[in-house]
Amino acid sequence: MKTASTSDKTSQLDVAIAAARQRKAAKAGNPNTPKGRGSNAEKPARTRLSVEEKAARDASREAEKLAAKANRDRLRAEKKATRDGAKAQPHLAKVMKAAAKLPKLGERAQLLFSEITVNLPAAEAASLALHLNHFNRANATARAIGSKLEEGTPVRIVGGDPRFIGMTGTVVKAQRIRCYVEVAGAKKPVYCFTSEVEALSTSKAATA
């Protein structure tokens, strides 16, 4: 004689079997249910390209690659130019600051300077600058040897601090190789080497 527990287990088993049969029947009757591996389900046929289509496809891919590479190269070049510009900017600022300290050229000197810088190549312009520096140094040495500065001597400043080049003044203190020149508008006497000034006659000092 079956016990109640055994009867319950048998009833549950029957229900499970019935449910499994129903699922299997529903699956078999659904034409959209995908079949597993190894089935004979038909696969869509692959489209075969002609030789011309393959060539066109390959050419299109190559063109896309070249365009992408060109774009990357352009971006790298722009970044490099930006970095180089940022690096060069401080140096340019120094150059502009130095240019602001240069003495003003007279009309004749400005014309000569413009003609030289426009018409001479960089190498010849650099050589000319060296020759001019040597000429000025030789003249300064000659002035230092041939002239004796004393207090009260009127002079024109021809070297040293660019702010005072071309200005005239009066020697207020003279030493063997150095002197102090009182210049109108300066807060204190300008310190110069004797080679950086040239003595003026009284008439020249009056008209300077």
Image (cartoon, helix red, strand yellow):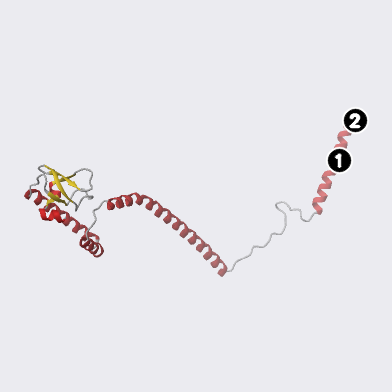
Q: Quickly name the residue at label 1.
A: 15
Compared across the picture, whether 42 is left or right of 67 comes to: right
Q: For this rendering, which residue is in front, 98 or 120?
A: 98
Helix, strand or loop at label 1? It is helix
- Is residue 90 positioned above or below 47 on the image? above
Query: If the image is split into quadrants, where does the C terminus sit?
Result: bottom left
Q: Position of residue 59 (x, y in %)?
A: 52, 65
Query: If the image is split into quadrants, where does the N terminus sit?
Result: top right
Q: Position of residue 201 (x, y in %)?
A: 10, 53
- Dots 2 and 1: beta carbons under 8 Å? no
Q: Quickly name the residue at label 2.
A: 4
Q: Position of residue 158 (x, y in %)?
A: 17, 52
Q: Check disc 2 and give the amino acid type.
A: Ala
Q: Check disc 1 and give the amino acid type.
A: Val
Q: For this rendering, which residue is in front, 171 or 33?
A: 171
Q: Residue furthest left?
A: 146
